[in-house]
């Protein structure tokens, strides 16, 4: 009671490393909501039939319950907000598809949120005709040496066609190569 | 007549701590923009956790239906004059409405002042009072003690010198023992200083492009060491 459990929820979140999430603690979340309902019940019983202006013991008791509800709300909101921020960063740092171990940490509505966020970003990038998710770190060189890992075949890049057979080496523009690298079909060849 | 917008006066250490981090992975595109609304820091988790610190209060009034707050009570209410420990977020609101008065916690008491006087850098804020500065800043308008402000500034100034010199020499992997003694705010400053020092070292030894002369074996490079 009195927002102690809500603070534990936030402790769990803050003890994780930056950019990582603990699994969604649905149980504790629901317990906090039940506590809010309890506070609300107590509040109702204290102000029933009472004159709101008189500052007696019931008034202060009901005020404390009211503050507890506000505090619980703030803790839960901050919990959701922080998780939403991290989920957004996943789109930029990890990609469109989340690995299994990250997906297991999100609850159903968070997974939906991720899908919707990806959709919004994609439609924006389509309007701009520009892929914003490549080159998150400014590259030193616009061209990159790559080695093809699995057979891709003929691909037209820019004004010429390149035949990307398995285990062949190419010297491509970084933007073209990055889509293949992120799918695991190519790797950067570092001397 | 134009009404002046009242801005929350932040103390010097927290002004520094709230500057954007130098981390290049901090994307400006991510973030739901709560800092521009009327309650800055509403979603800030360290602010919320800081307000969970317990303070000892004395009730000026009674309060019904909240017996769980006072472990010593038998009825479901708190008596007028009771002295109990409340979390700061509750004590703060009740104090504003003159329902309770807050006693100064031990972290700003005489013993602490003596410890700081003896050697500020050795005081262990990390384990005992990780939110030392933020808590002090929020507490001191509510309590009558005017000495808390100068005390915070004095403590910070004395610890800052040593922290700065240690952060510039500390390596990235090892965690020096004294880091565990830093409060959350000092820790942020320490990390910022350490990472900027690492970036500086990387910049110093960056590849300037070795210039080969026609004579094999002679390489010219500018020497920065």
Image (cartoon, coloured by chain):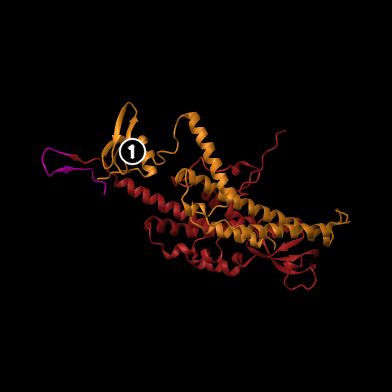
Chain colours: A orange, B red
Residue at image x 35%, y 39%? Answer: A139
Rendered position, A126 above or below A97: above
Does residue B219 show up magenta in the picture?
Answer: yes
Question: Which of the pair A140/B207 is nearer the observer?
Answer: A140
Residue B222 position, x and y percent, is 23, 43
Q: Where residue B99 sits in the image (x, y, percent)?
A: 77, 60
Question: What is the crowding at mark 1: few (fewer than 14 residues within 10 Å), some, or many (at least 20)?
Answer: some
Q: Could you say whether the residue bearing mark 1 is in a helix, strand or loop? A: loop
Q: List the residue tagged with mark 1.
A: A152
| Of B102 and B173, the residue lying toward us | B173
**Does B162 sit left or right of B74 as displayed?**
left
Asked whether residue B136 appears in the rendered view, the answer is no
Which quarter of the image is occupied by the N terminus of chain A?
Answer: bottom right
Which residue sits at x=76%, y=67%? B67
Secondary structure predominantly adopted by residues drawn in magenta: loop
Q: Is residue A94 above or below residue B116?
A: above
Segment tinted magenta in the rendering: B212-225
Residue B147 located left or right of residue B175: right
B78 part of magenta stretch: no
- Image coordinates of residue A181 in percent, x first then y, are 36, 42
Left or right of A123: which side holds B91? Answer: right
| Horizontal and vertical percent position of residue A63 | 77, 57
Question: Please, is residue A133 above or below residue B202 in the view?
Answer: above
């Amino acid at each position: 009671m009195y927002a102690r459990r809500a603070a534990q929820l936030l402790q769990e979140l803050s003890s994780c490393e930056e950019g990582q999430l603990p699994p969604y603690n649905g149980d504790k979340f629901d317990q906090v909501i039940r506590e809010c309902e309890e506070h609300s019940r107590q509040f109702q019983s204290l102000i029933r039939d009472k004159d709101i202006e008189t500052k007696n013991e019931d008034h202060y008791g009901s005020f404390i319950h009211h503050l507890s509800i506000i505090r619980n709300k703030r803790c839960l909101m901050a919990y959701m907000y922080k998780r939403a921020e991290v989920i957004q960063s996943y789109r930029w740092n990890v990609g469109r598809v989340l690995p299994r171990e990250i997906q297991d940490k999100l609850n159903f509505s968070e997974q939906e949120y991720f899908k919707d966020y990806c959709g919004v970003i994609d439609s924006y990038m389509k309007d701009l005709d520009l892929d914003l998710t490549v080159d998150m770190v400014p590259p030193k060189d616009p061209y990159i040496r790559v080695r093809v890992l699995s057979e891709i075949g003929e691909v037209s890049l820019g004004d010429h066609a390149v035949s990307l057979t398995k285990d062949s080496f190419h010297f491509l523009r970084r933007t073209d190569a990055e889509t293949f690298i992120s799918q695991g079909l190519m790797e950067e060849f570092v001397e | 007549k134009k009404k002046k917008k009242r801005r929350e006066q932040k103390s010097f250490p927290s002004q520094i701590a709230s500057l954007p981090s130098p981390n290049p992975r901090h994307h400006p595109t991510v973030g739901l923009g709560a800092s521009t609304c009327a309650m800055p820091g509403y979603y800030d988790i360290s602010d919320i956790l800081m307000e969970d610190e317990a303070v000892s209060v004395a009730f000026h009034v009674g309060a019904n239906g909240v017996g769980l707050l006072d472990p010593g009570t038998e009825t479901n209410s708190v008596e007028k004059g009771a002295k109990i420990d409340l979390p700061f977020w509750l004590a703060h609101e009740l104090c504003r409405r003159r329902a309770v008065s807050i006693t100064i916690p031990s972290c700003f008491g005489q013993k602490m002042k003596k410890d700081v006087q003896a050697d500020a850098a050795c005081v262990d804020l990390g384990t005992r009072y990780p939110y030392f500065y933020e808590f002090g800043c929020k507490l001191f308008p509510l309590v009558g003690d005017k000495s808390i402000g100068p005390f915070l500034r004095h403590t910070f100034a004395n610890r800052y010198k040593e922290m700065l010199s240690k952060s510039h020499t500390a390596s990235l992997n090892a965690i020096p023992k004294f880091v565990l003694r830093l409060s959350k705010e000092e820790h942020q400053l320490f990390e910022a200083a350490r990472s900027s020092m690492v970036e500086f070292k990387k910049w110093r030894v960056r590849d300037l492009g070795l210039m080969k002369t026609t004579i094999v074996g002679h390489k010219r490079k500018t020497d920065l060491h």
